[in-house]
C-alpha cells in the first residue's frame, strides 16, 4: 500500500483566486493521478501527473485551469486557477505503484469551497 | 466511453444482515477494485480483482470478478454499524490507450440500522 498526505485538507477561497494542493507519498510510485469529486457524486479523473513531462488531461479539463507539477516520484501539485463556485469540490490525489495489474490508492482529499 | 452501472444506489439494512451490491460494465475490464469512502475521507481500497472468475475475501467482505469480465459484485456479511459509508466499484479497461484509467461506479450508500 501507500500512505498519501494532502495539503491543505480544506480551504475556503475567494472567486478569481488560485489554490495549489500538494500531494506527498511515503514511497516512490509510478503513477500519480488527480481526481475531482463533486458533492454527492462519484470520482472524475482530472489528469495523470507525469514525472518530468506535462500532465495528461482528460476531456473537459485543461492545463490553464488545472496546472499540475510532478517533480519526482513522491510528490505532485494540482493548482485550481481562477476559481469559481463551480470549482467547489473534493480534490483527491491517487497513486499506483507499478505493473499492469495494480492497486490504486487515494489520499484523504482536499475539500475546496469557493465563495 | 466506458460506463459502469452500480446498484443499488442506496441500501438501508439491519445490523447483522448480509449486503450485496454489484457493478456492470458496457465493456470488458481487466481489473475490478472496490472502495469504501467515509464522510470527509478519501476512498479506501477494500478488495482488488485481476482475473475473471476470481473470488476474493477480506474479512467479512467478499468480491468476485465476473466470468464475462463485464461485472463484479461485493458482499458484506453480518453487517455492523461501522460498515456505513459509500461503496464504489472501479474498473480498469483492456482497451488500448485506456489501460491506466479507472472508471468509477456511481456508488452505493449503505446505512446500517441498529
Image (cartoon, coloured by chain):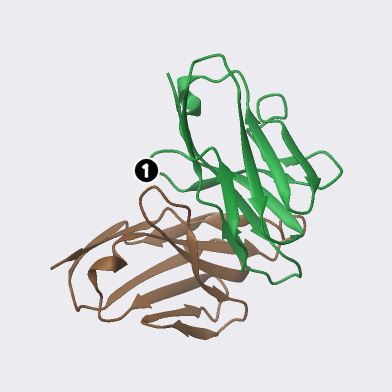
Chain colours: A green, B brown
Residues A59 and A94: in front is A94
User: From the image, which quarter does the C terminus of chain B lie in?
Assistant: bottom left
**Residue drawn at x 50%, y 15% as measured from the top left:** A15
Instruction: Judge whether B24 appears above or below A16 on screen.
Output: below
**Residue drawn at x 50%, y 71% as measured from the top left:** B71
Q: Give x and y (percent) for residue A4.
A: 60, 55
**Residue drawn at x 45%, y 21% as measured from the top left:** A85
Q: Give x and y (percent) for residue A98.
A: 75, 67
Instruction: Judge whether B60 appears above or below A99 on screen.
Output: below
Instruction: Judge whether A77 appears above or below B97 on screen.
Output: above
Report the chain holding disc 1. Answer: A
Residue receiving disc 1: A40
Query: Dot 1, crowdedness within 10 Å: few (<14), some or many (≥20)?
Result: few
Q: Is residue A98 left or right of residue B25?
A: right
Q: Give x and y (percent) for residue B74.
A: 41, 74
Instruction: Judge whether A105 appears above or below B74 on screen.
Output: above
The local secondary structure at tag 1 comes to loop
Amino acid at each position: 500500500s501507500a500512505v498519501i498526505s494532502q495539503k491543505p485538507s480544506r480551504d475556503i477561497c475567494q472567486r478569481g483566486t488560485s489554490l495549489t494542493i500538494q500531494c506527498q507519498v511515503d514511497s516512490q510510485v509510478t503513477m500519480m493521478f488527480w481526481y475531482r469529486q463533486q458533492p454527492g457524486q462519484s470520482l472524475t479523473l482530472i489528469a495523470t501527473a507525469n514525472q518530468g513531462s506535462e500532465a495528461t488531461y482528460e476531456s473537459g479539463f485543461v492545463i490553464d485551469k488545472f496546472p499540475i507539477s510532478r517533480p519526482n516520484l513522491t510528490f505532485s501539485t494540482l493548482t485550481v486557477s481562477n476559481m469559481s463556485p463551480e470549482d467547489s469540490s473534493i480534490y483527491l490525489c491517487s497513486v499506483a505503484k507499478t505493473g499492469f495489474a495494480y492497486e490504486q490508492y487515494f489520499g484523504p482529499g482536499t475539500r475546496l469551497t469557493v465563495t | 466511453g466506458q460506463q459502469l452501472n452500480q446498484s443499488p444506489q442506496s441500501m438501508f439494512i439491519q445490523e447483522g444482515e448480509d449486503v450485496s451490491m454489484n457493478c456492470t460494465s458496457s465493456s470488458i475490464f481487466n481489473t475490478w477494485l472496490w472502495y469504501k469512502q467515509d464522510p470527509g475521507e478519501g476512498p479506501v481500497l477494500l478488495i482488488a480483482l485481476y482475473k475473471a472468475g476470481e473470488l476474493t475475501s477480506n474479512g467479512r467482505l467478499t468480491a468476485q470478478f465476473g466470468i464475462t469480465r463485464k461485472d463484479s459484485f461485493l458482499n458484506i456479511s453480518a453487517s455492523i454499524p461501522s460498515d456505513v459509508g459509500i461503496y464504489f466499484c472501479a474498473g480498469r479497461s483492456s482497451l488500448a490507450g485506456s489501460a491506466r484509467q479507472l472508471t468509477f461506479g456511481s456508488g452505493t450508500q449503505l446505512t446500517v440500522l441498529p
